Amino acid sequence: MSRGRSSKRKRGQAMVEFALVLPIFMLVLSGILDFGFALYTRMTVINAAREGARAAVMVPANTDITTVAQAASISSAAGAGLTLSAPAVTCYQTSASPSSTTVIPCNTAVSGDTVSVAVSYTYHSFFPLSFGATFNLGSTVQMVIEF
């Protein structure tokens, strides 16, 4: 008789231990998943900025650099499931003297000038206890115009 009672108590003890450990395990697991998605989103934002800058430096002189850079960044992010607003594109005149950087309109940029593409994205955490409700991810890439 005592053997049956002891077996039931052990099963009950295991259920109590499981009930205590399960919330902690789920919290850690959701934190790992949320961090993984945030890291993937950060890499996508970096790649979108890189794609935009690379597209901008390869365009012919008669093409609008800003439009090309924004379109390349947005399409790169859309391929990964992100919706970006128009990235900031800035051109600097560095062809005259490499030590000075003067902001110029991108439609007047020439070979040797620099284009900078800044992409930002607000990441919404699916589990707010992990990192908070939202945080901003951003990347800026500068490249020399080659056309």
Image: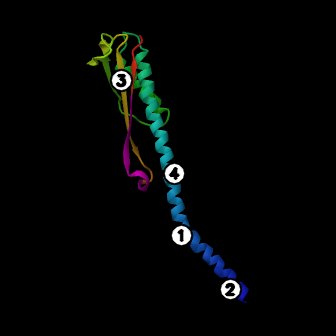
The Cα atoms of the two marked residues, 4 and 3, are separated by 33 Å
Label 1 sits on residue: 20
Residue 121, position as x, y percentages in the image? 38, 38
Within the magenta stretch, is there residue 135? yes
Graded by Cα atoms within 10 Å as few (under 14), some (14 to 19) or many (20 or more), the crowding at tag 1 reads few
84 left or right of 34 in image: left
Mark 4 or 3, nearer chain start: 4
Mark 1 or 3, nearer chain start: 1
Which residues are the magenta region?
128-140
The Cα atoms of the two marked residues, 4 and 2, are separated by 40 Å
**Taking 25 as reference, is 56 above or below it?**
above
* SS assignment at label 2: helix
Q: Do the residues bearing badges 4 and 3 touch, measured as CB atoms within 8 Å? A: no
Mark 2 or 1, nearer chain start: 2
Residue 87, position as x, y percentages in the image? 35, 29
Q: Amino acid at mark 3?
A: Ser
Count of numbered marks:
4
Graded by Cα atoms within 10 Å as few (under 14), some (14 to 19) or many (20 or more), the crowding at tag 2 reads few
**Taking 27 as reference, is 120 above or below it?**
above
Label 2 sits on residue: 5
The Cα atoms of the two marked residues, 1 and 3, are separated by 52 Å
Mark 3 or 2, nearer chain start: 2
The Cα atoms of the two marked residues, 3 and 2, are separated by 74 Å
Label 4 sits on residue: 32
Color theme of the render: rainbow
Outermost bottom residue: 1
Q: Amino acid at mark 2?
A: Arg
Label 3 sits on residue: 116
Disc 3 versus disc 2: nearer the observer? 3
* SS assignment at label 1: helix
